[in-house]
Amino acid sequence: MRRTLTVAAALAVAACAVLVAQAPGPADTSAPGFDISGYWTAPLYEDALERGAGPELGDYGGFPINEAARLFALSYDASRVTLRHHQCDGYVAPYSVRSIGNARAWEERDPHTQRLIAIHWYNQTFEGHRTIWMDGRPHPPAWAPHTWMGFSTGSFVGQALQVQTTHLKQGWLRRNGLPESDQATLVEFFVRHGDHLTHTSVITDPVYLAEPEIRSTDFARQPMDHQTWLFACDDGEQILGRAADRVPNYAFGENPFVNEMRDRYRIPAAAYLGGPETSSPDLLTKLASLTDADGVAKTKPASGPRPISRAVDPQPRDGDVHVWPLRGGLFLLVGDSGNIVVQAGDEGALLVNSGAGTLAEKTLARIRQLSDKPIQYILNTGFQPEHTGGNVALRASGGDPSVRGSFFALQFADAGVGATIVAHQNVQNRMVAAKRAAAGVPSDTYLQERRRTFHNGDAIEMFWQPRAVTDGDSIVHFRRADVIVTGDVFTTTQYPPIDVPNGGSVQGEINALNDILARTVYQHEGEGGTIVVPGHGYVSDEHEVVEYRDMVVIVRDRVQAMIRKGATLDQVTAARPTADYDTRYGSTSGTWTTDRFVEAVYASLNRR
């Protein structure tokens, strides 16, 4: 059942608390368990609003959402699913379990010892295949990729299978636009009673929930294979002629469907627009006192201090540099502020960016573990110090035999002495103007469109992104490995740091994100396929990029609408046009705050 009855929810919380308290450590899977293998189907009449045609628009009642989640849902236009990159979005694990359709479970055991390695759960809808690891392995680090199903580990606790899941993608609490963030974690309990299975989930989401969301779903065992397991999806054009920078959305307070439930069922809007108070035992006594003004207040950002991001920063803080394998001889190095990508091969190492340089010696040590060849190239996606601060040290450790002794090298006194640094010409211009150390300034530059090379068996292209974060941004595409490195054009940790004085603009940023999406291909149900490495944050694919693109477009639309009405910067800032994203990307301190982002959007639109 959905969390609507407070007594039932309280009992579920208490039961889950007891089970968690009894739970052994994640590596203790020796307790005798039970087998959930077989075919299962959930009854369609149970919480019918969560299945079939889905819930009514605006109905978030009983969900303990915060302001950001409510505003996100109210701005959501269902026609967004007609966008190419949203047509095949899958379901995240908590929603997948409740989705319409059948499920299959089976065990994976060691062929020699018969030790239980994993339990697999497969949902028909969107082909959701979960692997619940039972062998005590740890969860991945914070910079690892997120998936629809997340990373799950399980153990038997009494008569329950307890599952803990992290690394989920952004998805839905409800299909009417109510979001679940990529910071959500999940604890589940599977309890079997003969041919019946009860599944209880506890969703904790610091970005969009004020308190955990508790749900339960019942399953009945089926006698045979349904043989209808595929839910294939290919995207295509659904609306012709729509500009790539258009994302359907409603302005704050302008969702035309928000009052449908009020008018149809004579329920005050404040009672069904969600929040912990909508599952409070005294809600019924308060209904009579709720007014239309209470409902209107919930559809717009409240005045007051800016919230800050509640997302986990995946940057390690242990003073070391860590390696994460990508694909095709490519590796991610994290720890020295900005992300670094290393291509290892028989021609010599190639780097995309060099980090801040504070851990240059440790970075170099990791590179030498990956390749016994000198660093030959360093490609800079921009001039930001957190991506170019290591240029001097890492360049000096390498060498480029392709220019040493070359006829054209006669014009360079230090040709071949160190690695060759490559970037757009504007990166060189900005670094020279800032009087950065000459040894760290790119000497090999390009002017328009792209720079291409073939190195270590892969075609590598740098694509210029005019007026994005700055006027010198590049994305780097390793074509055979199918890995795109974005620099600060895309991050998972903050709003895009649009540097208007150095040529950045919100429209150029949107164009750059769309250029990335024009080069990505998903592998299955909107995930996998092309790997996207952000300037800061965890390893991603096109789903994270499209959600980020949507956010920038929606904020641009809100600011642009206010500018057209003559609003000043102070008025725009006070209106909180980022209110539904601040708990994910916002900051009130440091070098890049929410207000500075809004100011950059405002300034670039005014200049335009």
Image (cartoon, rainbow, N blue to C red):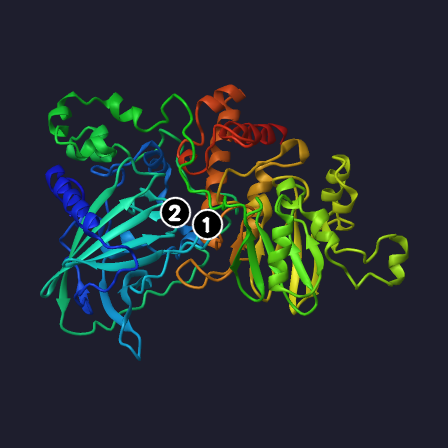
Quadrant the C terminus occupies: top right
- 28 lies left or right of 428: left
Pinpoint residue 371: horizontal percent, then vertical percent: 64, 64
> Which one is in front, 130 or 436?
436
Pinpoint residue 546: horizontal percent, then vertical percent: 47, 49
Place residue 271 in its image quadrant. Answer: top left
| Residue at far bottom of view | 112
**Secondary structure of residue under mark 1:** helix
Using the rendered image of the protein, determine whether residue 149 is visible from the camera's viewpoint.
no
Q: Contact, CB < 8 Å: mark 1 with mark 2?
A: yes
**Secondary structure of residue under mark 2:** loop
The residue drawn where x is 21% and y is 45% is 214
Q: Residues within 10 Å of mark 1 (few under 14, many from 20)?
A: many
Residue 544: give its label. Answer: 1
Using the rendered image of the protein, determine whether residue 487 is visible from the camera's viewpoint.
yes
Residue 182: give its label. Answer: 2
Classify 403 as above or below 570: below
Q: How many marks?
A: 2
Pinpoint residue 261: horizontal percent, then vertical percent: 21, 35
> Which one is in front, 489 or 360?
360
Place residue 304 in its image quadrant. Answer: top left
- 528 lies left or right of 417: left
Mark sitting earlier along the chain (1/2): 2
- Which residue type carries mark 2? Asp
> Which one is in front, 178 or 267?
178
